[in-house]
Amino acid sequence: MSGCIFCRIVAGEVPAQIVKKTDAILAFTDMNPQAPTHLLIIPTMHIGSLNDAKDPNLLGSLLAFARDLAKEKGLATRGYRVVLNTNPDGGQTVFHLHVHLLGGRVMNWPPG
Ligand code: AMP
Ligand code: ZN
Protein backbone atom coordinates (compact mmCIF):
# COMPACT_ATOMS: atom_id res chain seq x y z
CA MET A 1 0.00 0.00 0.00
CA SER A 2 2.20 2.81 -1.29
CA GLY A 3 -0.08 5.57 0.01
CA CYS A 4 -0.19 4.21 3.54
CA ILE A 5 2.01 6.12 6.00
CA PHE A 6 2.65 3.07 8.19
CA CYS A 7 3.54 0.91 5.17
CA ARG A 8 6.00 3.65 4.23
CA ILE A 9 7.52 3.46 7.73
CA VAL A 10 7.84 -0.33 7.33
CA ALA A 11 9.55 0.23 3.96
CA GLY A 12 11.95 2.77 5.49
CA GLU A 13 10.61 5.55 3.25
CA VAL A 14 9.32 7.63 6.18
CA PRO A 15 11.53 8.06 9.26
CA ALA A 16 10.34 6.75 12.60
CA GLN A 17 11.90 5.96 15.94
CA ILE A 18 11.88 2.17 15.68
CA VAL A 19 11.80 0.44 19.06
CA LYS A 20 11.56 -3.23 18.11
CA LYS A 21 11.10 -5.23 14.93
CA THR A 22 10.44 -8.74 13.73
CA ASP A 23 9.54 -9.86 10.21
CA ALA A 24 5.84 -9.63 11.09
CA ILE A 25 5.63 -6.79 13.63
CA LEU A 26 7.15 -3.32 14.05
CA ALA A 27 7.00 -0.99 17.06
CA PHE A 28 7.85 2.70 16.92
CA THR A 29 7.18 5.84 18.94
CA ASP A 30 4.01 7.82 18.29
CA MET A 31 4.81 11.26 16.81
CA ASN A 32 2.14 12.88 19.01
CA PRO A 33 2.60 11.12 22.36
CA GLN A 34 -0.34 11.04 24.77
CA ALA A 35 1.70 9.62 27.67
CA PRO A 36 5.40 9.52 28.68
CA THR A 37 5.61 6.21 26.82
CA HIS A 38 3.44 6.01 23.70
CA LEU A 39 4.37 3.32 21.21
CA LEU A 40 2.56 1.98 18.16
CA ILE A 41 2.72 -1.72 17.36
CA ILE A 42 1.81 -2.62 13.79
CA PRO A 43 1.83 -5.65 11.52
CA THR A 44 4.41 -5.18 8.75
CA MET A 45 1.80 -6.30 6.21
CA HIS A 46 -0.99 -3.87 5.41
CA ILE A 47 -4.26 -4.55 7.22
CA GLY A 48 -6.67 -1.62 7.25
CA SER A 49 -8.31 -2.10 10.62
CA LEU A 50 -9.30 -4.69 13.19
CA ASN A 51 -12.36 -5.36 11.02
CA ASP A 52 -10.05 -6.59 8.24
CA ALA A 53 -7.77 -8.73 10.43
CA LYS A 54 -8.36 -12.35 9.44
CA ASP A 55 -5.57 -14.06 11.38
CA PRO A 56 -6.23 -14.49 15.11
CA ASN A 57 -2.61 -15.61 15.60
CA LEU A 58 -1.39 -12.26 14.33
CA LEU A 59 -3.77 -10.44 16.66
CA GLY A 60 -2.45 -12.48 19.57
CA SER A 61 1.12 -11.75 18.51
CA LEU A 62 0.43 -7.99 18.41
CA LEU A 63 -0.97 -8.14 21.94
CA ALA A 64 1.93 -10.23 23.24
CA PHE A 65 4.36 -7.84 21.54
CA ALA A 66 2.74 -4.89 23.34
CA ARG A 67 2.84 -6.79 26.66
CA ASP A 68 6.53 -7.65 26.19
CA LEU A 69 7.37 -4.04 25.33
CA ALA A 70 5.51 -2.86 28.44
CA LYS A 71 7.70 -5.21 30.50
CA GLU A 72 10.87 -4.08 28.73
CA LYS A 73 9.97 -0.41 29.28
CA GLY A 74 9.40 -1.04 33.00
CA LEU A 75 5.66 -0.35 32.80
CA ALA A 76 4.28 -3.76 33.69
CA THR A 77 4.11 -3.47 37.47
CA ARG A 78 2.59 0.00 37.72
CA GLY A 79 0.42 -0.64 34.69
CA TYR A 80 -0.23 0.58 31.20
CA ARG A 81 -2.98 0.78 28.62
CA VAL A 82 -3.32 -0.95 25.26
CA VAL A 83 -5.72 0.73 22.83
CA LEU A 84 -6.94 -0.32 19.41
CA ASN A 85 -9.08 2.35 17.76
CA THR A 86 -11.29 1.06 14.95
CA ASN A 87 -12.93 3.17 12.25
CA PRO A 88 -14.17 6.76 12.70
CA ASP A 89 -16.34 6.30 15.79
CA GLY A 90 -13.45 4.44 17.43
CA GLY A 91 -11.10 7.34 16.74
CA GLN A 92 -9.00 5.61 14.08
CA THR A 93 -7.16 8.12 11.91
CA VAL A 94 -4.51 5.91 10.28
CA PHE A 95 -6.02 2.98 8.41
CA HIS A 96 -3.23 0.48 8.96
CA LEU A 97 -3.96 -1.72 11.96
CA HIS A 98 -2.05 -0.55 15.05
CA VAL A 99 -2.06 -1.10 18.78
CA HIS A 100 -1.25 1.86 21.02
CA LEU A 101 0.84 1.12 24.13
CA LEU A 102 0.52 3.96 26.65
CA GLY A 103 2.21 4.17 30.01
CA GLY A 104 4.14 6.26 32.48
CA ARG A 105 1.14 8.05 33.94
CA VAL A 106 -2.20 7.17 35.52
CA MET A 107 -4.84 6.58 32.84
CA ASN A 108 -8.36 7.93 33.15
CA TRP A 109 -11.60 6.07 32.63
CA PRO A 110 -13.88 6.39 30.74
CA PRO A 111 -11.76 7.36 27.73
CA GLY A 112 -12.85 10.38 25.71
P1 AMP B 1 -5.29 6.30 15.56
O1 AMP B 1 -5.96 7.62 15.82
O2 AMP B 1 -5.66 5.23 16.55
O3 AMP B 1 -5.47 5.87 14.12
O4 AMP B 1 -3.75 6.55 15.81
C1 AMP B 1 -2.87 6.98 14.82
C2 AMP B 1 -1.62 7.41 15.55
O5 AMP B 1 -0.56 7.46 14.62
C3 AMP B 1 -1.73 8.81 16.18
O6 AMP B 1 -1.50 8.69 17.58
C4 AMP B 1 -0.65 9.60 15.47
O7 AMP B 1 0.02 10.49 16.34
C5 AMP B 1 0.28 8.51 14.98
N1 AMP B 1 1.04 8.82 13.78
C6 AMP B 1 0.56 9.24 12.59
N2 AMP B 1 1.56 9.37 11.70
C7 AMP B 1 2.69 9.00 12.35
C8 AMP B 1 4.07 8.93 11.99
N3 AMP B 1 4.48 9.24 10.74
N4 AMP B 1 4.97 8.53 12.91
C9 AMP B 1 4.57 8.21 14.16
N5 AMP B 1 3.29 8.25 14.57
C10 AMP B 1 2.37 8.65 13.68
ZN1 ZN C 1 -0.31 0.13 5.49
Image (cartoon, rainbow, N blue to C red):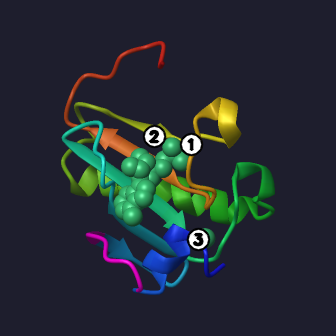
53 left or right, relative to 40: right
> Where does ligand 2 appear, by image quarter?
bottom right
User: Disc 1 marks which amino acid?
Assistant: Leu
Which residue in the protein does label 2 denote? 82
Disc 3 to disc 1, C-alpha distance = 18 Å
**Where is residue 63 drawn, in percent x and y?**
52, 53
Would you say residue 24 is visible in this rendering?
yes
59 left or right, relative to 13: right
Which residue in the protein does label 3 denote? 4
The boundaries of the magenta stretch are 13-18
SS under mark 1: loop
In the depicted structure, whether residue 97 falls above or below residue 103: below
Q: Is residue 17 magenta?
A: yes
At a point 31% along the width and 71% down the height, the residue shown is: 16
**Where is residue 20 drawn, in percent x and y?**
33, 72
In the depicted structure, whether residue 11 falls above or below residue 68: below
The answer to the question of whether label 2 and label 1 lie on touching residues, with beta carbons closer than 8 A, is yes
- Indicate which label's residue lies in the foreground, 3 or 1: 3
